Image (cartoon, rainbow, N blue to C red):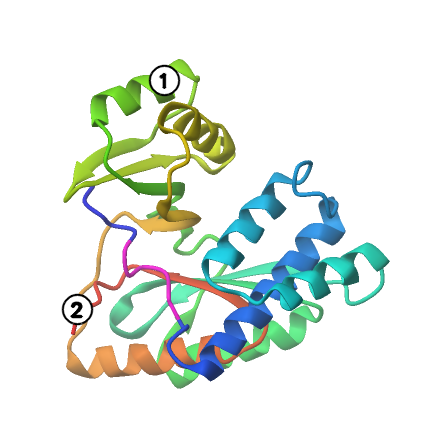
Amino acid sequence: MGRAYQNRKASIAKTSDAKAKVYSKYGREIYVCAKNSGIDPNGNLALRRLLDNAKKDQVPAHVIEKALDKAKGGAGEDFVPARYEGFGPGGCNVIVDCLTDNNTRTFNDVRLCFTKAKAKIGAPGAVAHMFDHRAVLVFKGGDEDSILTALLEADVDVSDIESEHGLITVLVPPHEYFKAKTALTDTLGDIEFEVDEITFIPQTSCTLNEDDSALFEKFLTMLNDNDDVQDVYHNVEIQEP
């Protein structure tokens, strides 16, 4: 497998302005999750994961509290998830996850991003079958065999596990996320996860030429500038500077 999840989820937390966008996206997602399934993270496991990741990404406490208070009040916008798929520059595969209160506006905005990048938005399912939807847990140390044994004893459906450069990577189906994380913490104690997310992992990778790479960066920037876009997944092999 290799660390195939790396560089496949577009990251935008590079500047103070970009960080503000990240905070806004977290706030919206926390609000929707809490409004739909309750504000108690002990009873809403998806919210617990969101809060853990928000704190790890240094989202200010007031942003989190505001989203939870808004959800508790029951008022506010009615956001719904929307997923768009298509083919980006160089024929790469792209999945765009959104939260929107206006499907028509969001679809038109996302389609415009594709069009400006000389890319093509597709029908639902156009590229999703070329990704594996997985929960990814990465942490330092541990013995691969003993960890696999502990997961199997906890009846976790393990998709893959590997040890590389001092890191253990565990992949499980999304619905096994909390069972796997509980089994790991029960076995290893209070561990710090280098990666702790539910994501889309491409089955194949795509390398872009110089022109397509520049267009792809522009494409990601346009998508990330859209407030409705929450996550962008792709199969581009991004070269480290």
Residue on which the image places disc 1 = 152
**Few, some or many residues within 10 Å of mark 2 (<14, 14–19, 20+):** few
Q: Would you say residue 110 is visible in this rendering?
A: no
Residue 170 place in picture, x, y as percent: 32, 35
Q: Quadrant of the N terminus?
A: top left
Q: Judge whether residue 219 is colored magenta.
A: no
Q: Residue at 57% across / 67% down in the picture?
A: 60
Could you tell me which secondary element the residue under label 1 belongs to? helix
Q: Residue at 45% across / 82% down in the picture?
A: 16
Q: Amino acid at mark 1?
A: Leu
Kindly indicate whether the residue at mark 1 contacts the one at mark 2 (C-beta within 8 angstroms): no
Quadrant housing residue 218: bottom left
- The number of discs equals 2
Residue found at the far front of this picture: 190
Residue 136 place in picture, x, y as percent: 37, 43
Q: Left or right? Give the position of 91 relative to 70.
A: left
Q: Quadrant of the C terminus?
A: bottom left
User: Which of marks 1 and 2 precedes in the sequence?
Assistant: 1
Instruction: Give the residues in magenta.
Output: 6-11
Quadrant housing residue 185: top left
Residue 125 place in picture, x, y as percent: 46, 52
Residue on which the image places disc 2 = 239
Separation of residues labelled 2 and 1 (CA atoms): 36 Å
Q: Residue at 69% across / 36% down in the picture?
A: 43
224 or 122, nearer to the observer: 224
Residue found at the far top of this picture: 153
